[in-house]
Amino acid sequence: MADVRISALTYYPVKGLAGVSVDQAEIGATGLQHDRSFMLVGPDGAFYSQRSLPAMAPLRVEVIDGDGLRLSDGTSPDLEIEVAYDGKRRDVSLFAKWFGAGVVQDPAADAWFTERLGKPASLVRVTPEHERPGWGVHAGQTGFGDAHALLITSLASLDELNARIVESGGEPIPMNRFRPNLVIAGWTEPHTEDQVLRATAGALELGYAARAIRCAVPTVDQATGRKSGPEPTRTLAKYRREPAYGGGVSFGMKAAVLTPGVVAVGDAFDVAEWLPEGPDPAPLTR
């Protein structure tokens, strides 16, 4: 039997910005601690994304001592601010489908991001009462993530994709293009994560929500913040089209947290139940 384990854990404090890799993480109802607890919004409250602002990719935010944020761009001095967990609110939205509130953060952070992105940007945090359900086989809850608590990929899936890209004359891509929370090692078959209905790792129990349909973000070089497409979308389109999801291409799976727990790199990833054979049931529950 394959030795299947977690090979990487990453959280993304600010939606759309660089991730922070950790050896251990507390995973709650909305995902890894601090994951997408913050986001940047424009004057109308709509969220900013690498989809239209690829320059967000290399900007890095780290949570320090639980009550502070360190903002880095790799060239100028870092900026540190205190986190406002509650206080002044403003209206925010995601995909023009979810409308809620965000806690306004330090104006110094707004100025910092505005300068680097070239357009007015405001940093907000989820409110203490934040509640936003996901969708899929297991819906769960999410913070400012697209729609789910966790994104899970596997090394086998990336190996298969890169082999196909290289065969077509392209350059292999790193896993960070897909911005996963958990990366699984040990499966011999690519896209095994698509078939996981329920799994455990340490005290964590998670449940399959839906396949991860990819937008344009994986074509962005996460180190430079520049689009470098058409890969991986071009190659994924040759073998990962999902008619049940409107014909989009998929890579990885979205999951809900069924039982919170602490997990670490190296923990065994045990599948408790597999999805039954047949069409993916997730699109029917959206």
Image (spheres, helix red, strand yellow):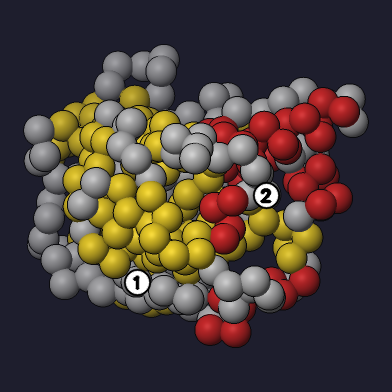
Q: How many marks?
A: 2
Q: Position of residue 139 (x, y in %)?
A: 40, 75
On screen, residue 101 above or below 179? below
Residue position for label 1: 140
Q: Amino acid at mark 1?
A: Gly
Q: Residue at x 47, y 44 (%)?
A: 180
Residue position for label 2: 216
Q: Please name whichever residue, 25 or 73, is drawn nearer the observer in this view of the structure.
A: 25
Label 1: few (<14), some or many (≥20) within 10 Å?
many
Q: Residue at x 23, y 63 (%)?
A: 259
Q: Position of residue 195 (x, y in %)?
A: 57, 60
Relative side of 175 to 237, left or right: left
Q: Quadrant of residue 250?
A: bottom right
Q: Amino acid at mark 2?
A: Ala
Sequence-wise, the earlier of marks 1 and 2 is 1
Q: Residue at x 19, y 65 (%)?
A: 127
Q: Quadrant of residue 138?
A: bottom left
